[in-house]
Amino acid sequence: YLEALELDPGFAPARFNLANLYNMQGRNEEAEAQLLAVLERRPGDGEACYSLGLLVAEMGRFDEAVDWLRRAVRGLPGRARARYNLALALREAGREEDALVELAAAERLDPRDPQIVHARAELHAGRGEWDEVRAAAARLAELAPGSPVVADLLRRAAAAGR
C-alpha cells in the first residue's frame, strides 16, 4: 500500500486498505491519519467519514465519532448501517433521544435488520420503557424467530413488573 501511495498519493483505495491494516494491527493513530488524508483530497467523502467515525468510536472518542458519522450519513443517505452506527455513538455520548431518532431512520431504510431493532429495544430497556421493549421484541421475533434475545427482552420486561 505504501508503494502504491508513493506512485499515486491520491489513490484512495490504497489509503483505505492501509488504514484497515493499521487498525487490525492496533495502530489506530496511523489509521486515522490515512483516513484524514483521504478527506483532505476528497472532503465529505461518505465512505471516509464512515470509516473515520467507526475508528474514533473504537478509540472511545464518541463525540467526535458522532460528528464523523453525521457527515457519513449526509454522504451515504441510503445506508442504514451508517445511521445505526451513528445511533450507537450517540448513545455512548449520552444522547439517547437523538439515538432513538437515528435508529428509527435506520429502521425505515432497512426494516429487516434485526440488529437495528435490537439496539432500539436495548435503548428503551435502559430507559425503563417496557411497552416499547415488548413492541421491539415482537418485531425482533418476526425478523429472527427463535432468537434468545427476544426471550431475554421479554423476561426483563416481565421482571420490571410491567
Image (tube, rainbow, N blue to C red):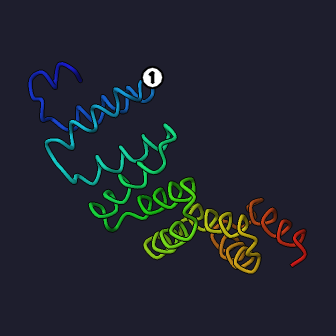
Q: How many marks?
A: 1
**Could you say which is closer to the camera, residue 128 or residue 157?**
128
From the image, which quarter does the N terminus lie in? top left
Q: Residue at x 16, y 24 (%)?
A: 4
Please give left or right for residue 92 compared with residue 36 in the image. right
Q: Residue at x 31, y 67 (%)?
A: 77
Residue 11, image x, y percentages: 15, 35
User: In the shown orientation, is residue 47 left or right of residue 54?
Assistant: left
Q: Residue at x 45, y 28 (%)?
A: 24
Query: Relative to the observer, which residue lies in front, 69 or 20?
Result: 69
Residue 69 drawn at (x, y percent)? 38, 55
Task: Using the image as rendered, state which of residue 93 and residue 7 is in the foreground.
Answer: 93
Q: Amino acid at mark 1?
A: Gln
Label 1: state its secondary structure.
loop
**Residue 53, x across and y down, in percent:** 39, 47
x and y percentages locating residue 64 in the rendered image: 41, 48
**76 relative to 6 in the view: left or right:** right
**Most distant residue in the top direction:** 3
Which residue is labeled 1 in the image? Answer: 25
Vertically, is 21 above or below 133?
Answer: above
Using the image, determine if residue 119 lies above or below residue 53: below
**Could you tell me which quadrant the C terminus lies in?**
bottom right
The correct choice, above or below, for 130 with respect to 116 in the image is below
Picture quadrant of residue 67: bottom left
Q: Residues within 10 Å of mark 1 (few under 14, many from 20)?
A: few
- Answer above or below: position of 67 versus 61: below
Quarter holding residue 119? bottom right
Of 120 and 92, nearer the camera is: 92
